[in-house]
Image: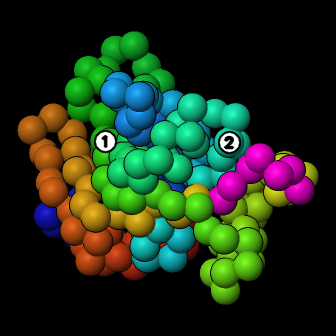
């Protein structure tokens, strides 16, 4: 993957806040739309989820998940298959409130989503960290790449100011 495509990947991840979360439970897959905040180096993706939601209950039983982020489809005259998109596969587990990582993760999430602060006071909400094992980045039609966590980190360093 060339540096220009790594930059595109970083812009795509940092430019979004809303993604499809794929989970598995009760013998069937489920895709849900969720807000996300990326951690430094794209080493993790933070999700603040309610236990009342099926996707949260699925993750608590089976942490394997995928987060799909897409470039917005803003025009009707463009082939949607040319849109940049990434699917990040990994494990998503709740961060214990008493863990050393929790305060920084919460602050990062609240910086991205200031209106989420009151929800941290509700007992049914959990802050999950999805740790990537691999990503599949499609930079456009016929330009697809398998991306390791190390390559995600490299990409994040190319566009740090976003």
Q: Residues within 10 Å of mark 2 (few under 14, many from 20)?
A: some
5 sits left or right of 54 in the view: left
Question: Which-is-in-front pick, marks 1 and 2?
Answer: 2
Calculate the distance from the C-alpha at mark 1 to the C-alpha at mark 2: 31 Å
- Tell me where residue 120 sits by quadrant: bottom right
82 sits left or right of 145 in the view: right
Which residue is more in the foreground, 143 or 106? 106
Which sits earlier in the primary sequence, circle 1 or circle 2?
2
Q: Which residue is mark 2?
A: 51
Q: Residue furthest top?
A: 76
* Residue 28 highlighted magenta (yes or no): no
Asked which secondary structure carries label 2, the reply is: loop
- Tell me where residue 103 sits by quadrant: bottom right
Residue 59 coordinates in the image, percent (x, y): 49, 47
Which residue is more in the foreground, 6 or 20? 20
Q: Residue at x 47, y 24 (%)?
A: 74
Residue 104 coordinates in the image, percent (x, y): 69, 78
The quarter in which the C terminus is drawn is bottom right
Q: Residue at x 41, y 28 (%)?
A: 26
Q: Residue furthest bottom?
A: 100
Residue 28 vertical position relative to residue 158 in the rendered view, above or below: above
The quarter in which the N terminus is drawn is bottom left
Q: Residues within 10 Å of mark 1 (few under 14, many from 20)?
A: many
Q: Residue at x 89, y 56 (%)?
A: 121
Q: Which residue is mark 1?
A: 84
| Disc assigned to residue 68 | none
* Residue 123 highlighted magenta (yes or no): yes
Residue 161 coordinates in the image, percent (x, y): 54, 73
The residues colored magenta run: 121-127
**Residue 68 visible:** yes
**Residue 69 visible:** no
């Amino acid at each position: 993957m060339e540096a220009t495509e790594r930059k595109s990947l970083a812009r795509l991840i940092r430019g979004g806040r809303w993604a499809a979360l794929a989970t598995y439970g009760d013998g069937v897959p489920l895709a849900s739309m969720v807000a996300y905040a990326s951690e430094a180096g794209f080493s993790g993706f933070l999700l603040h989820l309610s236990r009342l939601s099926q996707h949260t209950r699925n993750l608590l039983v089976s942490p394997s998940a995928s987060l799909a982020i897409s470039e917005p489809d803003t025009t009707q005259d463009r082939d949607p298959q040319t849109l940049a998109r990434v699917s990040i596969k990994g494990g998503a587990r709740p961060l214990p409130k008493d863990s050393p990582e929790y305060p920084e993760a919460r602050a990062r999430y609240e910086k991205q989503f200031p209106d989420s602060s009151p929800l941290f006071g509700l007992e049914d909400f959990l802050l999950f960290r999805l740790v990537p094992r691999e990503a599949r980045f499609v930079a456009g039609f016929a330009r697809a790449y398998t991306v390791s966590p190390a390559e995600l980190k490299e990409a994040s360093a190319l566009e740090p100011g976003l």
